[in-house]
Amino acid sequence: MVLLKPIIFSAIQPSGQLTLGNFIGTISHWSTIQDKYNCIYSIADLHSITVSQNLYLFKKNKLDTLAIYLASGVDPQKSIIFMQSEVHEHCQLNWILNCYTYFGELMRMTQFKSKSKINSQNINIGLFNYPILMSADILLYQSDKVLIGQDQKQHIELTRNIAHRFNSLYGNIFKIPDIYIPNKYSAKIMSLLNPYNKMSKSDSNKNSVIFLLDDQKTVLKKISKSVTDSDGKIFYDINNKAGISNLLNIFSSLTGKSILELEKKFFNTTYKDFKYLLANVISKKLNDLQEKFYYFRSQKSYLKNILDIGAYKARKKAKKNIKVIYDILNL
């Protein structure tokens, strides 16, 4: 008997330059799980338009994002890579799930509250409805697991609740997805200047963020200016030493060394020297990534071919699953 590999789903928005937080939290793990799972990786462009976009940059960013996927080791022969907007079944299922989701559930979503504050001039229904489209993305492919950062856990709980609610009415239609978070230290990287906030590509202060295409000089400058504390001792304490704990998380994630190992290694190291060493570790990782990125990014027709093939494969799965749901609802 042939055992089918479980399905794992993950996605990134192409709404700006991807960050070190995106890489450590999700993308860096995608290549390592391709042999164990049937991987479906989406470029979530529909999610991106919940905030205003420069349309020229948006088009460019979509291919940039794909090139980053490939540079990170995602293999289109092993994984399905596609543009969300090219598979219309996402929108079809989104509407159906809207009809099985309560207003109060969406009102409790913390990410909507925080994004509404940032985009106070554009609090649109798409932003409010964002978690339901995310649920549709996941449930459409009968995903067993979803690879996410910690800030998305609430959305997955909503997805599970919607799936349970639908199943209680119509039978076991949807798989109930589990959260796949690779490890404790790689799920969430914080802002360099405000280590109590997530590192975000939309941060107005670009010195808070390491972008994947930053050069060595820029990385050193940003890490050198990162917020720490006046204690001068390097050890992990997320409550009292959030800044240095964040830098330890980054160092650990990029080198594979445990936090305990790093605490011992840098026990007598100054913050200045530690930051210099960390900047070198980051730059080496980014240099390798950037070399591959620019190679793939120069092959526009190849990138478009990958998206065409990926959309075909994703659409084939999506059509099969949406038909089951339509038949149940007599649509």
Image (tube, grey):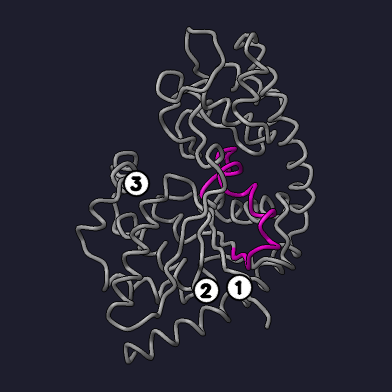
Horizontal and vertical percent position of residue 318: 51, 78
Q: Which mark is residue 124?
A: none
Which residue matches tag 3? 111
C-beta proximity under 8 Å, tags 3 and 1: no
Above or below, 269 relative to 287: above
Horizontal and vertical percent position of residue 215: 70, 30
Label 2, label 1: how far apart the Cα atoms are:
6 Å
Image quadrant where one finds the C terminus: bottom left
Q: Amino acid at mark 3?
A: Gln
Q: Amino acid at mark 1?
A: Ala
Q: Which mark is residue 311?
A: 1
Q: Secondary structure at mark 1?
A: helix
Q: In the picture, residue 267 is in which quadrant?
A: top right
Label 3, label 2: how far apart the Cα atoms are:
25 Å
Camera-side residue of 240 and 127: 240
Q: Secondary structure at mark 2?
A: loop
For the point 79% across and 42% down, the residue is: 291
Return the residue found at the far front.
Answer: 1
Residue mark closest to the camera, 3 vs 1: 3
Q: In the picture, residue 41 is in which quadrant?
A: bottom right
- Nearer-N-terminus badge (3/1): 3
Q: Within 10 angstroms of label 2, few (less than 14), some, or many (20 or more) residues?
A: many
Q: Within 10 angstroms of label 3, few (less than 14), some, or many (20 or more) residues?
A: some
Which residue matches tag 2? 87
Camera-side residue of 117 and 41: 41
Judged left or right of residue 160, residue 24 is right
Return the residue found at the far left.
Answer: 104
What is the tally of numbered marks visible in this picture? 3
